Every structure is written in C-alpha cells, then in structure tokens.
Image (cartoon, grey):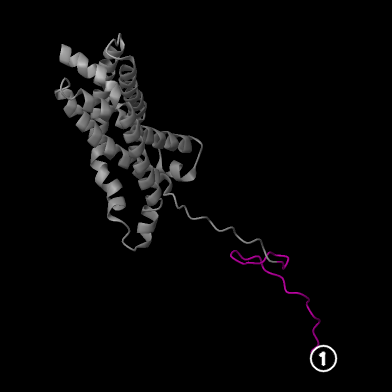
Amino acid sequence: MTGYRPDPGPRRDSGVPGSSRCPWGRPGPARPAVPRDHTGGADGNERLTAAAGAVLLVLFAAEGVTILSIHQLITMHFFLGMLLIGPVALKAGSVIYRFTRYYTGAPGYRRKGPPAPLLRLLGPLVLITSAGVIGTGVALGFIGSAAGPWLFLHKAFFVLWFGVMTIHVLVYVWRLPRLIGPDLRGPAGLARARDVLAGRATRWLLLAASIAGGLLIAAMTVHLAGPWAGFHHAR
C-alpha cells in the first residue's frame, strides 16, 4: 500500500552521555548521591588541631610563669601540668588521625597534602618531648621528693621541648586567627560557611571535654604536690 511504513518497534536510546537510559532501552543505574561531610573533613581536623593548640599555648604560658617562682608556685605548677594532659591528648589524637587518614589514602586528606618536610620532622619531636615533660612530671608527683633521676629527666625534657616548641609556635601561630576565627564567629548564612563550619559543634565538644578531663585529673591529683611544697620550703 502506498505510503505504508512498517512499525520500527521500541525506540532505542542512542547512548548519548548524560542520558538516563542505557543503549538497550532500559533505565540505567541511578548515580549514588555523594554524602555530605558533616565533620569538616581535613579542614575540620586542621581547625580542631589549631583550637587545641591555642588552648595549649595559653596553658603552657601560664605553666612557664610558675617556673619563674617555682618554690612559691609549686602547687599551681603541678595543677597546670596535670590539666595539660587533656588538651595535649586531644591535639596528639588529632595529629595522629590526620597522619593515618593521609597515609591510608583518604581523598580529602590527600588533596590537602602533607606538611612541609621540616614540619614533618618537627611533629614527632613535639609529641615525644611533650609526652616526656608531662610523663616525667606525673612520675615526680607519684614518686615524691625522693625523685632519683626523674627530676633530671623532667628538666632535660623541658629544655628539649622548649627548643622544639619555639620553632613550632613561630611557624603555626600566625595561622590561628584564620583557622579558629570562623568557629568563634559562627556561620554567616553563606553556603561556604556551612562547608567551613561543618563539624563545629563536634570540635567544641571535643575541646571542652579535653579541658574538663584535664581539670578532673588535676583536681584528683593536686594533693600529690604536697611533698614537693614541703621539700621546697625546707630547702
């Protein structure tokens, strides 16, 4: 019959990129939605590390003041030393977490990249000397004034820690306003603010918990400074 055309059958998709159908006419698999990172990722980790560092900078400065008059301020020196345990543990955990995530290939941490080579060498020294100063201080509290080599080790670790920490602070202190400023100001209603401040509540909770934990340890152990107070008054 004139003008007759056979039915071509079901229309097939051309397979053009972006089509929601596959070349055989069946719907293609839906692309999984990328979950939103509510923890802040690598940037959030960096902000948590910076916030813990800012707290430690204040506490270490106060601890340094007690050294200037250690005979009169030995109890305060001991209290602050125990208080430092919480924030030091938080910062160490944050740094180790970043290290682990980077070397296990987490995309956000790989994109951020590692610290400069000098700082990669400096990081473990900061952790080791900080642990040495606090660890020997705790040992002195429990051993008492008959300290043996522990007092010498405490002083030696402090000298090493002071040198390493001076470099560390000079490198990082100028970054603190940029890193912790948004967390202090709060969101400004912009989309970028939501990304930057992701995990803000968790960071504040961790920081508060570290300080509260340190205060609890200090309150429970401050009586251990008693023998040292008597030792310095007797000298």
- Which residues fall within the magenta stretch? 1-26
The answer to which quarter of the image holds residue 73 is top left
Image location of residue 29, percent across then percent down: 66, 61
Q: Which residue is mark 1?
A: 2
Badge 1 amino acid: Thr
Q: Measuring 34% from the left and 39% from the top, which residue is drawn there?
A: 212
In the depicted view, which residue is nearer to us: 184 or 79? 79
Judge from the rendering whether residue 171 lies leftward or rightward of residue 121; answer left or right.
left
Left or right relative to 225: residue 5: right
Residue 102 place in picture, x, y as percent:
46, 37
Residue 141 to residue 213: above or below: above
Residue projecting furthest to the right:
1
Q: Main secondary structure of the magenta part?
A: loop
The residue drawn where x is 53% and y is 56% is: 34
Q: Residues within 10 Å of mark 1 (few under 14, many from 20)?
A: few
Where residue 27 sits, quadrant-wise, is bottom right
Residue at 36 percent of width and 53 percent of height: 196
For the C terminus, give its image quadrant: top left
> Does residue 64 lie above or below 175 as drawn?
above
Q: Is residue 153 above or below residue 112?
A: above
Q: Note whether residue 84 is visible.
A: no
Q: Nearer the viewer, residue 190 or 156?
A: 156
Residue 171, x across and y down, in percent: 25, 35
Number of marks in the rendered image: 1
**On-image quarter of the N terminus:** bottom right
- Magenta stretch: includes residue 162: no
